[in-house]
Image: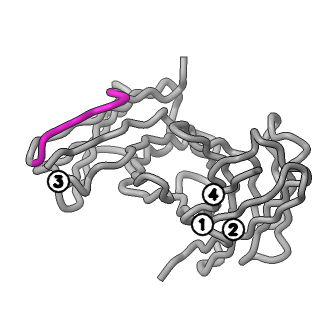
């Protein structure tokens, strides 16, 4: 059974039209991550939650926001998508801080027209 | 210079060949992870290593802490092994991953 579920798997939006991607987990892990991955590149961390504590990466654009209403769910909001935001968005979970394994979801492929 | 370097960047092999992918890192780590990503797919964790060697099926991962080097070996490679393999370090004092640039493997039938 999937541990990390992402919806939708494919999202098409128009330039400037807000979009929300969702991630849910079945393991109640403390840490949830959002990554952006462009073609042939390593994932780039956007932000993460440790429980309810939000941690933004310094170079994450203000256009990207996140919400974690409870342990199981986390959302990525892109307020005004630009063409450069087209990418795969990956959600990952991790049990605790430290060196534990991150478990990744299947990703949401975002297309911006 | 990246804190986590992988080689080679691209690798093409014939089915059945023994494959080695290398990872070097320059930071202190609490663990080193090997990940697999098929085209257009999510990322799957293969191994987490803090010392020694681990084996799962045809995959073997080793790490030398003193030399700050890890290798991923695939024995009897198969076309379904075609994927990007990524090494990622859990740097000491943090739980975030530092990713290598990935190795794109193609195994030909």
Q: CA distance from mark 3 to mark 4?
A: 28 Å
- Separation (CA) of disc 3 from disc 2: 37 Å
Q: Tell me what residue is drawn at x 54 percent, y 23 percent.
A: B2
* Precedes in sequence: disc 4 or disc 1: 1
Q: Which residue is mark 2?
A: A30
Percent x, y for residue B85? 38, 44
Prevalent SS, magenta region: strand
Q: Position of residue A35 (x, y in %)?
A: 66, 50
Cα distance between the residues tagged 3 and 1: 33 Å
Residue A74 seen in the current view: yes
| Label 2, residues with CA under 10 Å away: few <14, some 14-19, many ≥20 | some
Q: Quadrant of residue B18?
A: top left
* Disc number for residue B78: 3
Query: Which residue is identified by label 1?
Result: A95
For mark 4, what is the residue?
A: A109
**Eyeballing the image, is B24 above or below A85?**
above
């Amino acid at each position: 059974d999937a541990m990390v579920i992402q919806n939708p798997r494919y999202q098409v939006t128009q330039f400037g039209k807000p979009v929300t991607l969702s991630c849910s987990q079945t393991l109640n892990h403390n840490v949830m991550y959002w990554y952006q991955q462009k073609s042939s590149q390593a994932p780039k961390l956007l932000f993460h939650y440790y429980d309810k504590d939000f941690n933004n990466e310094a170079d994450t654009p203000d256009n990207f926001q996140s919400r974690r209403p409870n342990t199981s769910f986390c959302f990525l909001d892109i307020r005004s998508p630009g063409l450069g935001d087209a990418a795969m968005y990956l959600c990952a979970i991790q049990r605790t801080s430290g060196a534990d394994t991150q478990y990744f979801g299947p990703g949401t492929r975002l297309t911006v027209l | 210079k990246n804190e986590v370097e992988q080689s080679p960047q691209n690798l093409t092999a014939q089915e059945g060949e023994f494959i080695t992918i290398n990872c070097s890192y320059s930071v202190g780590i609490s663990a080193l992870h090997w990940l697999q990503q098929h085209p257009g797919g999510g990322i799957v964790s293969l191994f987490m290593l803090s010392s020694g060697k681990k084996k799962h099926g045809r995959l073997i991962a080793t790490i030398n802490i003193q030399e700050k080097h890890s290798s991923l070996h695939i024995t009897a490679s198969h076309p379904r092994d075609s994927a990007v393999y990524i090494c990622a370090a859990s740097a000491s004092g943090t739980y975030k991953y530092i990713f290598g640039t990935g190795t794109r493997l193609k195994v030909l039938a």
